[in-house]
Image: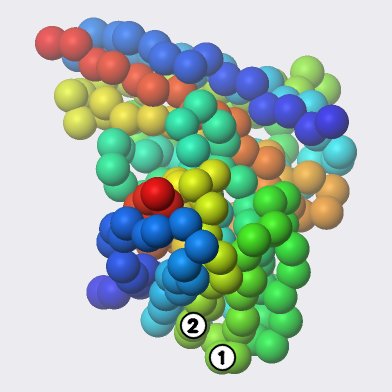
Amino acid sequence: TAGITQAPTSQILAAGRSMTLRCTQDMRHNAMYWYRQDLGLGLRLIHYSNTAGTTGKGEVPDGYSVSRANTDDFPLTLASAVPSQTSVYFCASSDSRANTGELFFGEGSRLTVL
Amino acid sequence: GQNIDQPTEMTATEGAIVQINCTYQTSGFNGLFWYQQHAGEAPTFLSYNVLDGLEEKGRFSSFLSRSKGYSYLLLKELQMKDSASYLCAVEDSNYQLIWGAGTKLIIKP
């Protein structure tokens, strides 16, 4: 069972370069999310999508963009990377019809911006 | 502002019981989640509380008091594999999740 898949697993990127983190889920969940996780801080929401064709800004959206062309894919793009975007990025999905709203996470993408 | 507080780190002994506390101040409340995250891995769902009281699931239990803005995760019969970070998250009135920084639990033999 694949669940939710992220790529790449890790990446080193020069400042100023662009990068797209890929996220695909096979659970037909309507909602998808991108979080970043930094040491000593809670997960912070970057962008989210409640359904295909719609996206919204989270707590820390600046410097990131997303698209949701279909149910399964939710890529995150850094247009011009900066060192403060060094982090571990997690994609997640949920079925808003479920009682608990449980999030299912991908394995994470570790990004280092130099 | 919205805030979730949990201890940074705790240590416990294999076979023992440990309680991880979480206090929260949020704009509204629509539920509280606990997730487990092993080092270098993704968070995985443990429990969900929306009403006051104790929810038991095997060796793990989660308690909620909405009036006190307080929850705890209770782990019994600790095993070495329980060494992980435990994340508390609250869903606010806008159905957005607010996350604590996590509690790193170290289990010693």
Is B8 situated left or right of A106 in this image? right
Q: Residue at x 36, y 68 (%)?
A: A6
> Label 1's element?
loop
Amino acid type of the residue tagged 2 in the rendering? Asp
Q: Which residue is mark 2?
A: A73
Which sits in the foreground, A109 or B66? A109
**Disc 1 vs disc 2: Cβ atoms closer than 8 Å?**
yes
Chain containing mark 1: A
Residue in the foreground of this view, choosing between A68 and B65 = A68
Vertical order, A88 against B65 (above or below): below
> Left or right of B80: which side holds B105?
right
Q: Position of residue A27 (x, y in %)?
A: 44, 78
The answer to whether residue B66 is seen in the rendering is: no
> Which residue is farthest left?
B109
- In the image, what residue type sits under mark 1? Asn
> Percent x, y for residue A3?
35, 72
| Residue B45, placed above or below residue A106 | above
Q: Is residue A64 above or below residue A55?
A: above
Give the alpha-carbon distance from disc 1 to disc 2, as whole Å.
6 Å
User: Can you tell which quarter of the image residue B33 is in?
Assistant: top right
Give the image quarter of residue B3. top right
Query: What residue sits right under mark 1 in the picture?
Result: A70
Image quadrant where one finds the N terminus of chain A: bottom left
